[in-house]
Image: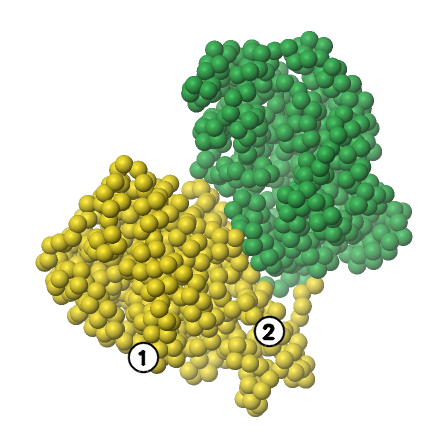
Chain colours: A green, B yellow
C-alpha cells in the first residue's frame, strides 16, 4: 500500500497550490510523529519508572527511524524540488501567502538537514538519550562525574558528526571528508545548510540565523558589565527586612498557590498539565496539549513560584500558536531564545516586580495564613518586593537570580563550545567548570552534583542551547519595555491581575508570528524598531538593583 | 535509505536460522511501535487533559499508519512465505525450538490478518478511538446515551467491516463480497484466517482458538446455575456483623495500604506504576514498564483493594513475561481470558479468602488506627472474611462481587453479539440492557450512566472481549485449585504473606508459557489434566457462599 513518489514530469503538470497541499499533508503527519516523541519524552521525565529506561530507549530508536524515513521521504523531496523550480521561474507570492511561503522555506531547510544525516546516526542518538539521562541521573545522585563521562563522550562524538555534515570545508580534514561526500550525494548547493564551525552548526538548530561571532562579543560585553555589578552587590549587605520569607513553606499550599497563579496568568488547564519534575520544563506537544513542570522547596518560596511562572510563559507561547497553520512549521516557535523571552518576561518582568505582587501578595497571605507565617500578614508590597529580589550568587543555574543567571550561561557556553570544537575533552569539564565558577561568581564548587552535573542538557546532547537562555533574557527586556510603551496603563492592569491584556499583546506580536521571520533579531527589530542590544538589559538590571541595594 | 525486500530467489539460498533472525528484527521493531501506542493509551486514560483528545487522535492515526506499514511490510511477508515453504519440505524442529516455531506461527497469523485490512480502515479506527472515548466520557457524565450513539455506530460499522474480511462466505452477501476480494488479493488458503461469524472473528483477537458455540453453551449453563444461586442468597438476610466496614475510608490511607499490598504480592515498583483512573486497567508496555490503575471509594473498602490486587495480578503476568523472547509474540499473554485468570486468581482466590487476611488484617488495622475505625481493631479474620464477602447485586460490573459478576458479563455478551451480527442496532441497547438487568439480577436501571454507559470497551471498539472476563473466572478457579494441590502448605504461606511461593509457581506455569500453546483450553488441559469446566467454578461459588450465607 506504499504510496509511490510521482515522477518529476508528473509533478511539473501540477499547480503550485496542489504541490503545496500535498506537501502540507506530509508535514502534518511528520509533526504528529514528533508530537509522539514529545509525549514519550514528557513521560520519561515525569512519570516513567527507573527500569523502564531500557525499553523506552528501544521505542525511541524505532520511532526515530520511522520519523527519519518520513522526514526524508522522496515524496517530500520531489515536492520541495518542484516548488523550488517554480520559485525560480515565477513569483509564488501571488499564489501562496507569506505563511505558506515560510512553510516551504522551513520544511526545505529541515529536509535538507535531515537528509544529510545517516539514519543509523539519528537512531543511535535517539536511543542513547534515554540511556544517557539514566546515567546522568545516577551520576548526579552520587556526585560521580566519571559514571556519566562515557555517555557524554559518545554524545559529543555524535554531535560533532552531525555538525560535521553541516560545515562546508575548512574546519578539519575529518569534517571536510564526511561532509563533502554527504553534501554531494544530496546535491546541495554551495551555501545550502552551511556553517562556519561545529558550534555554529549546532546552535543554529536552536537559534536559527544567530551568528556565533556576534554571540562571543555579546557575552564578553555582558561578562565585563555583570561581574563588577555582582561584586558591588555582594559588597553591600542586604539592608531590608526579609525574616518573613524564612519560615518553611508547605508544599501542598505552594502547589495550590502556583496552580492558581498559572491559571490567572492564562494557562488553559484543559489543554495541558502542571506537574513536578527534577528539572522543570515545558513541552508543547500540541497547542491543545501543553505540559509543564515545576519543583518546590520548603525553604525557598521563590523556587516554586518562579519555576511555575517561567514555565507558564513557555506554555502560553505553545498554547497560543497560530491555529490556522496548526502542525505546520510556520506555527512553531521562532527560536529557543524567543521561547525563553516569553518565559523570562513573565518570570522576571512580571513576577519579580511590584504590580504583580499588588495582585498576588493578598493571595499569598490567604494561602499561608497559619501561625508560622504570621509575620507575612503585615508585610506590604514594597517590603515584599525588596526581600523577594535579594541577590545571592549560588551554584545552581535554575535557582539563580536574574543578575547572576547570565554568568551561569556564559560559563556553560564557553565550556560546550570548546568541547564541540574539539579544544577540550569531556574529562576537562569538572576542573574547568570549577575554575570559572570561582572567576565569575566567586564560588568554590565542592562537588560535581552542584557543579557540572547539575543540568540535563548535555546528557541529551543539547549543545548550543545554553546561550539562548541569555539571548532570551535580552529579548525579554526589550519586548517588555516595548509592551509597556504600547499598552496603556499596563502596570495598573497587572496590579489588578488583568494579565490577559499583556498575554493578548504577546500572543499577537510574538506567539502568532511563529516562525514567519527568519531570526530572533528580525523579530526584535520588527517589533521594537531597535536591534538586539545587551546594554538595554544591563541598564535594566543596574537601575533595578541600584535602587534595591542602594549601590 | 529504504531497505528493499529480497527476492524470493535470494531468500531461497538463506538458512532457516538466518530467515528467522531477520524476521525477529522486524517483529521486535513492530512490537516497540505497539508499545508506543500503549504509552499513548495509558497517558490518554490517566494523564491527558480534556482538549488534548483532538491532537491525540491525529497522533494515533499517524502511528497506526506507520505500524500498519511495518506490520504488513513485504519484507515480513516474503520472510514468512519462505519459512512456510521450508516448513512444508523439512522438519524445522531440528533447527528452531518450540518458542521460535511459535513466533513464526503467531507472526504469520498477525501478518495475514493485518494485510486483510485496508490501511485507511486501520487508521480511521485508531483515530476514532480517542474521539469516541471523549464522547463516551461526556455522555456518561450526563447520562445521555444519544451523545455517544453516533460514535458507537461508526465503531460497530468498522468492527463489522474488519470482521467481514475474516469470514469465508455464507454470512452475508456484503461480507462475502468484501472478503473474497481481499482474500484473493492476499492469496489466502481456504481455511486461513477464516471464522464462521462476525462475533467469532472479533472474539478470536482476544481469546484465540475459543469457539463461540462452546461459549454460548457455557454461558447458558452458568445462567441456569447462577440466577437461582443469587436469588437464594438475596432471600437470606446477611446474618453477620459488618458495622466495622461502614465508617468512611480515607483515600490517602487506602493508597498507602494498597501500594503496600501490591508490593508485598510482588509488583516491581521500579518497573511500573500504580495510579488512579476512572476505569482501572493494567497495561504491559514492556515487562520493565507495566502500568496499572485503581480507584478508591470512601464508602466501600473492597473497591480500592480488589481493584489494586486485581490489576496487580495482571501486572505480575506482564512483568513475568519470558525475557528470553522479549518483544516477540511468544512472550505475550496467551489470551485475554488467561490474562484475566491471573488478575482474578489474586483478587478472588487470594484476597477474598482467609489466609490472605491472616496477613493483611493486622496491616489494615495498623493503617486505620484512628477513632472512627475503633470497631475494626477487635475484629478477627473469621468475622472480617464474612463481612468482606457480602453479596450485593448492583448496577456496576467492576464493583460486582464474584457471584453476580458473570451475569454482568453474560448480559454484555448477548448484547454485543447481537450488535455485531447485525441482529440489533445501537439504539436498541439501552432498553435491552435494562430488561436483562431486571431478568438476571432483579434490578431496575434508572439511568444509562450506571447502565449501558458504564464501560469504556465499546467506545474503543472492543467487541468480543467481555466473555473473556468469565472465561478468566473459570480458568482462575481451576488454576488455583491445581496450585493448592501442587504447592505444599500454600494456605500457610499466604497467611504469612509469603506470596512469592504462589507467584513463582504462576510465573513458571502460566506467565513464562506466554503464547506457546494455542488456546486457553490447551493451557488448562496441559496444566491441570482436565478440560475447562464451568461446573468447577459453580461448585466453588456454591460451597463458599453456602457456608457464609448458611444456604
Residue B186 in sight from this viewpoint: no
Residue shown at 21%/53% (left/top)? B383
Q: Is residue B461 left or right of residue A489?
A: left
Residue shown at 23%/56% (left/top)? B382
Q: The residue tagged with tag 1: helix, strand or loop?
A: loop
Horizontal and vertical percent for residue A504? 53, 26
Q: The residue tagged with tag 2: helix, strand or loop?
A: helix
Q: Nearer the viewer, residue A7 or B334?
A: B334
Q: Residues within 10 Å of mark 2 (few under 14, many from 20)?
A: many
Residue shown at 46%/45% (left/top)? B48
Q: Is residue A114 left or right of residue A383?
A: right
Q: Tell me which chain the residue with mark 1 is part of.
A: B
The residue singled out by tag 1 in the image is B531
The residue singled out by tag 2 in the image is B23
Quadrant of residue A70 within the rendered picture: bottom right
Horizontal and vertical percent for residue B486? 37, 74
Count how many numbered circles sit on residues in the image: 2
Amino acid at each position: 500500500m506504499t504510496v509511490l513518489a510521482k515522477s518529476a514530469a508528473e509533478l511539473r503538470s501540477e499547480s503550485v497550490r496542489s504541490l503545496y497541499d500535498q506537501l502540507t499533508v506530509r508535514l502534518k503527519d511528520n509533526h504528529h510523529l514528533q508530537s509522539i516523541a514529545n509525549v514519550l519524552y514528557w513521560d520519561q521525565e515525569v512519570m516513567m519508572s527507573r527500569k523502564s529506561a531500557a525499553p523506552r530507549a528501544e521505542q525511541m530508536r524505532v520511532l526515530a527511524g520511522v520519523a527519519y524515513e518520513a522526514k526524508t521521504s522522496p515524496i517530500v523531496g520531489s515536492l520541495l524540488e518542484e516548488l523550488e523550480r517554480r520559485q525560480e521561474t515565477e513569483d509564488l507570492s501571488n499564489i501562496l501567502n507569506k505563511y505558506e511561503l515560510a512553510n516551504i522555506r522551513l520544511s526545505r531547510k529541515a529536509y535538507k538537514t535531515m537528509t544529510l544525516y545517516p539514519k543509523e546516526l539519528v537512531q543511535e542518538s535517539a536511543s542513547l538519550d534515554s540511556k544517557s539521562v539514566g546515567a546522568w541521573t545516577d551520576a548526579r545522585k552520587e556526585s560521580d562525574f566519571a559514571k556519566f563521562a562515557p555517555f557524554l563522550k559518545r554524545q559529543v562524538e555524535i554531535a560533532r558528526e552531525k555538525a560535521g555534515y553541516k560545515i562546508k570545508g575548512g574546519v578539519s580534514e575529518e569534517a571536510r571528508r564526511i561532509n563533502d561526500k554527504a553534501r554531494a550525494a544530496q546535491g546541495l548547493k554551495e551555501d545550502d545548510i552551511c556553517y562556519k564551525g561545529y558550534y555554529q552548526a549546532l546552535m543554529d538548530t536552536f537559534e536559527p540565523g544567530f551568528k556565533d561571532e556576534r554571540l562571543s562579543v555579546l557575552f564578553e560585553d555582558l561578562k565585563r558589565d555583570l561581574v563588577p555589578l555582582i561584586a558591588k552587590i555582594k559588597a553591600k549587605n542586604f539592608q531590608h527586612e526579609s525574616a518573613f520569607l524564612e519560615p518553611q513553606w508547605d508544599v501542598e499550599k505552594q502547589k495550590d498557590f502556583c496552580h492558581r497563579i498559572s491559571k490567572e496568568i492564562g494557562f488553559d488547564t484543559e489543554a495541558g498539565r502542571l506537574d513536578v519534575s527534577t528539572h522543570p520544563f515545558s513541552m508543547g506537544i500540541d497547542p491543545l496539549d501543553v505540559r509543564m513542570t515545576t519543583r518546590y522547596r520548603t525553604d525557598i518560596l521563590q523556587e516554586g513560584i518562579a519555576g511555575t511562572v517561567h514555565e507558564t510563559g513557555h506554555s502560553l507561547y505553545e498554547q497560543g500558536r497560530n491555529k490556522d497553520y496548526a502542525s505546520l512549521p510556520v506555527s512553531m516557535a521562532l527560536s529557543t531564545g524567543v521561547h525563553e523571552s516569553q518565559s523570562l518576561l513573565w518570570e522576571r518582568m512580571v513576577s519579580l516586580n511590584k504590580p504583580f505582587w499588588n495582585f498576588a501578595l493578598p493571595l499569598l497571605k490567604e494561602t499561608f495564613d497559619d501561625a508560622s507565617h504570621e509575620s507575612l500578614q503585615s508585610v506590604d508590597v514594597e517590603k515584599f518586593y525588596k526581600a523577594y529580589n535579594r541577590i545571592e550568587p549560588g551554584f545552581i543555574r535554575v535557582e539563580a537570580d536574574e543578575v547572576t543567571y547570565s554568568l551561569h550561561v556564559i560559563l556553560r557556553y564557553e565550556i560546550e563550545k570548546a568541547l564541540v570544537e574539539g579544544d577540550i575533552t569531556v574529562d576537562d569539564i569538572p576542573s574547568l567548570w570549577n575554575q570559572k565558577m570561582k572567576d565569575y561568581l566567586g564560588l568554590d564548587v565542592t562537588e560535581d552534583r552542584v557543579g557540572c552535573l547539575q543540568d540535563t542538557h548535555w546528557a541529551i546532547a543539547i549543545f548550543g542551547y545554553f546561550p539562548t537562555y541569555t539571548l532570551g533574557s535580552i529579548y525579554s527586556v526589550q519586548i517588555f519595555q516595548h509592551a509597556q510603551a504600547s499598552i496603556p496603563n499596563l502596570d495598573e492592569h497587572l496590579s489588578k491581575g488583568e494579565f490577559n491584556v499583556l498575554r493578548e499583546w504577546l500572543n499577537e506580536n510574538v506567539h502568532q508570528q511563529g516562525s514567519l521571520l527568519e531570526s530572533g533579531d528580525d523579530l526584535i527589530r520588527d517589533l521594537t524598531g531597535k536591534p538586539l542590544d545587551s546594554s538595554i538589559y544591563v541598564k535594566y538590571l543596574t537601575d533595578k538593583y541600584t535602587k534595591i541595594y542602594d549601590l
